[in-house]
Image: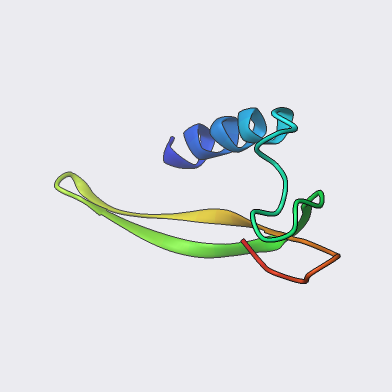
């Protein structure tokens, strides 16, 4: 369920062109894979895949 919520938020983030640019150089960011992250909540521990994006211009990963 948490992964589904994260995916929906990421899609909303991607649809906003002004937010999906590199904060260092202003160029468009591109998907660069994902990395697993663990979230600890009072109701349990969950692992979700966090998407990574990369600027092809300055090569920063976000």
Which residue is found at the position 75% from the left and 51% from the top?
26
- 9 left or right of 17? left
Q: Residue furthest left?
A: 42
Front residue (pair 30, 41): 30
Which residue is found at the position 51% from the left and 39% from the top?
6
Dividing the picture into quadrants, the one containing residue 55 is: bottom right
Check the image and tell me how it is coloured.
rainbow
Q: Residue furthest right?
A: 57
Tag count: 0
Front residue (pair 44, 56): 56
- 9 left or right of 41? right
Dividing the picture into quadrants, the one containing residue 7 is: top right
Is 7 above or below relative to 21?
A: above
Which quadrant of the figure contains the C terminus?
bottom right
- Image coordinates of residue 60 in percent, x first then y, are 69, 69
- 62 left or right of 59? left
Front residue (pair 37, 59): 59
Which residue is found at the position 81% from the left and 49% from the top?
28
Which residue is found at the position 43% from the left and 35% from the top?
1
Front residue (pair 30, 50): 30
- Image coordinates of residue 57 in percent, x first then y, are 85, 65
- Image coordinates of residue 21 in percent, x first then y, are 72, 46
Is 31 above or below relative to 20?
A: below
Is 20 above or below relative to 22?
A: above
- Image coordinates of residue 33 in percent, x first then y, are 72, 62
Is 6 above or below relative to 55?
A: above
Q: Residue furthest bottom?
A: 59
């Amino acid at each position: 369920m948490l992964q589904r919520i994260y995916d929906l938020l990421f899609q909303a983030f991607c649809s906003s062109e002004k937010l999906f640019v590199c904060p260092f150089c202003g160029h468009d960011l591109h998907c660069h894979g994902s990395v697993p992250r663990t979230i600890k909540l009072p109701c349990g521990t969950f692992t979700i895949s966090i998407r990574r994006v990369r600027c092809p211009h300055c090569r920063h990963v976000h």
